[in-house]
Image: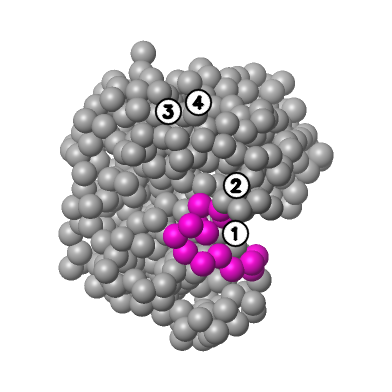
């Protein structure tokens, strides 16, 4: 088979890395890819939302199936586009991708079908949203309705912070059109967890869970990012908690989407709040309609089975016949970012030391591209690399990473020191 993977981040590098292990695969193309994918696949210089050029590449290279990494092309209808052309594609339709593309749609769905979630209200008027905030007696979370590259959520502690966030989103337009509407919801306390499942619209295949770190600096300080690191599995995940997540949240969502005439096929990523220590009432914060980034980088190294078998079963509607096998070890990933991220940062900085790591470490590229010199790799984005290790314990995996990561160097490189460090 010939596969085309859409995207350019560490998530897509991880997908390509895992797909390349399948005996079914002859060739892998990546659009547009990065310096990491270029080492194990063929990069195509095509933007993820240039459907016409992607279709030409599919025809030219005889691509048998497409795997979509990021949310934007899904929200713009890439799955519908290629299905109309008879090309198998892994990812939800435009209507189903509204689960992530519109937080207002998602919250309405949760409330209509009784899926446990934070109480919320949706506003398109800054005046009305501000007045609502002033009426609240406890802290709130402000969410831009549309896609904002994982950065459109502002967790506040005071009314003033909430009002300032509303102004940035709705007046200053910090997240562009994503801020046309906002969702204001109660601030839940507990531990966040990302739970992943795959569905073909009928059957639900549980994957595994992970925890990520959104803030740019140690001890959860600084602005939100797309994610600075993650680990899997969560130390607090029990079989009974997982059963509640599946029975009360994931499966009801799949059934609800079918009832709404928006059958969901693809990866379903639930962002959850767990009320520790009881962990008896998990609540849904939001859905993403694809593998998470950086969670994908710690989930796929734990998958012993053939990822292509799962993807093909999803596309063919035979997911109930698949039973994946997982590595019981802990996987930890630490993101190396450019100085200034998630704000302004420089690109084109040479990266050294990528080949100086211990053999059992994995490096997934994100914001990288081949440099002008042979074999050279330079930075091209805010999140540059994810350094990943497996270990019998979380401590062992962490120590592997942090004893190696400083061998990788580029100007202004920074990373959190507290990923998977539990108090």
Local crowd at mark 1 within 10 Å, few (<14), some, or many (≥20)? some
Q: How far apart in space, not on screen, are marks 4 and 1 (Cα)?
A: 33 Å
Q: Position of residue 53 (x, y in %)?
A: 64, 77
Q: Secondary structure at mark 2?
A: strand
| Residue that lies at the very extreme toward the front in this rendered image | 374
**Horizontal relation, residue 358 to residue 408: left or right:** left
Tell me: residue 296, above or below residue 74. Answer: above
Q: Which residue lies under the disc numbered 2?
A: 377
Q: Earlier in the sequence, mark 4 or mark 1?
A: 1
| Residue that lies at the very extreme toward the right in this rendered image | 172
Q: Earlier in the sequence, mark 1 or mark 3?
A: 1
Residue 71 in sight in this render: no
Q: Which residue lies under the disc numbered 4?
A: 406
Q: Which residue lies under the disc numbered 3?
A: 404
**Horizontal relation, residue 1 to residue 85: left or right:** left
State which mark lies toward you, 1 or 3: 3
Local crowd at mark 2 within 10 Å, few (<14), some, or many (≥20)? many
Bounds of the magenta segment: 34-47
Q: How far apart in space, not on screen, are marks 2 and 3 (Cα)?
A: 18 Å
Q: Residue at x 41, y 80 (%)?
A: 64
State which mark lies toward you, 1 or 2: 2
Q: Which residue lies under the disc numbered 1?
A: 72
Q: Secondary structure at mark 3?
A: loop
Q: How far apart in space, not on screen, are marks 4 and 3 (Cα)?
A: 6 Å
Q: How far apart in space, not on screen, are marks 1 and 3 (Cα)?
A: 34 Å
């Amino acid at each position: 088979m010939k596969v085309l993977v859409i995207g350019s981040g560490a998530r897509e590098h991880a997908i390509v890395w895992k797909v390349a292990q399948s005996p079914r695969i002859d060739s892998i193309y990546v659009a547009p890819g990065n310096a990491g994918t270029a080492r194990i696949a063929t990069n195509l210089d095509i933007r993820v939302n240039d459907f016409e050029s992607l279709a030409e590449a599919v025809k030219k290279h005889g691509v048998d199936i497409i795997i979509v990494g990021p949310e934007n092309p899904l929200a713009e209808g890439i799955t519908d586009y290629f299905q109309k052309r008879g090309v198998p594609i892994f990812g939800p339709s435009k209507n189903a991708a509204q689960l992530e593309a519109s937080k207002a749609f998602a919250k309405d769905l949760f409330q209509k079908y009784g899926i446990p979630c934070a109480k919320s209200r949706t506003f398109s008027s800054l005046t009305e949203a501000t007045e609502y905030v002033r009426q609240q007696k406890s802290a709130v979370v402000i969410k831009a309705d549309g896609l904002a590259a994982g950065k459109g959520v502002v967790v506040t502690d005071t009314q003033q912070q909430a009002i300032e966030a509303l102004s940035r989103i709705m007046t200053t337009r910090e997240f562009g059109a994503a801020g046309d509407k906002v969702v204001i919801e109660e601030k839940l306390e507990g531990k966040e967890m990302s739970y992943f499942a795959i569905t073909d619209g009928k059957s639900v295949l549980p994957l595994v869970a992970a925890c990520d770190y959104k803030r740019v600096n140690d001890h959860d300080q600084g602005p939100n990012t797309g994610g600075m690191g993650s680990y899997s599995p969560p130390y607090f995940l029990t079989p009974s908690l997982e059963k509640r997540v599946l029975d009360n949240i994931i499966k009801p969502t799949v059934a609800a989407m079918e009832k709404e005439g928006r059958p969901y096929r693809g990866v379903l990523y639930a962002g959850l709040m767990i009320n520790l220590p009881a962990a008896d009432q998990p609540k849904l914060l939001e859905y993403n309609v694809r593998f998470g980034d950086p969670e994908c980088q710690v989930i796929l190294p734990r998958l012993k089975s053939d990822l292509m078998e799962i993807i093909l079963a999803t596309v063919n509607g035979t997911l109930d016949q698949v039973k994946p096998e997982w590595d019981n070890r802990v996987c930890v990933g630490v993101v190396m970012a450019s100085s200034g991220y998630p704000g302004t940062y420089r690109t084109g900085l040479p990266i050294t030391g990528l080949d100086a790591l211990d053999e059992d470490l994995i490096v997934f590229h994100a914001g990288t591209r081949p440099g002008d010199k042979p074999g050279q790799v330079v930075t091209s984005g805010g999140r540059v690399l994810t350094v990943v290790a497996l270990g019998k314990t979380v401590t062992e995996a962490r120590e592997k990473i942090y004893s190696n990561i400083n061998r990788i160097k580029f100007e202004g490189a920074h990373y959190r020191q507290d990923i998977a460090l539990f108090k």
